[in-house]
Amino acid sequence: REDQNAEAGVEYGGHGAFTHSLLLGLAGAADIAVDGHKDRAVSLKELVGFVERSVEKNTLGFQRPTCTPLRLLTAVDPLRLVPVSQSD
């Protein structure tokens, strides 16, 4: 948002809070368990939700990224961005 400054620092691996959260999400942190099992893939919907929550939490609410058009995604999100290679 225009009224917010990016937070960058050592705690984010030298990245800003948004990029740090995006990279974590793509690495598998955004994979949501359904019925107790993760599908080992990160969907666009999962990634957007993860980044929005993570950035707001990590910046203590000073940054609140929004992806308004992506909120129009239906409950069924067939777009899988990346397979998750790490173990659960």
Image (spheres, helix red, strand yellow):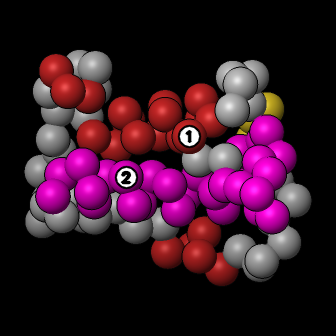
Q: Provide the secondary structure element on which disc 1 rests.
A: helix
Number of callouts in the render?
Answer: 2
59 drawn magenta: yes
Magenta-tinted stretch? 32-60
Element under disc 2: helix
Q: Is residue 73 left or right of residue 2?
A: right
Q: Residue 43 placed where, x, y %?
A: 73, 51
Please state if 82 lies on the left or on the right of 45 as rendered: right
| Mark number, residue 29 | 1
Q: Is residue 44 visible?
A: no
- Residue occupying the point 37% across, 33% down: 20
Label 2 Cα neighbours within 10 Å, binned few <14 / some 14-19 / many ≥20: many
Which is nearer the N-term, disc 2 or disc 1?
1
Q: Is residue 54 visible?
A: yes
Percent position (x, y) of residue 17? Answer: 27, 40
Which residue occupies the foreground of this view, 65 or 42? 42
Q: How far across and how far down the image is residue 64, in percent?
A: 28, 64
Side of 3 where 76 appears, left or right: right
Answer above or below: position of 58 versus 8.
below
| Callout 2 touching callout 1 (CB < 8 Å) | yes
- Which residue appears at 40% of the width and 67% of the height? 66
Give residue 78's mark.
none
Three-letter amino acid code at the position of disc 2: Ser
Q: Which mark is residue 54?
A: 2
Report the front residue among 69 and 49: 49
Q: Out of 65 and 25, give the one closest to the viewer.
A: 25
Identity of the residue drawn at 71% across and 25% down:
87
Gap in angstroms between the C-alphas marked 2 and 1: 10 Å
Q: Determine the residue positioned at 37% across, 52% down.
A: 54
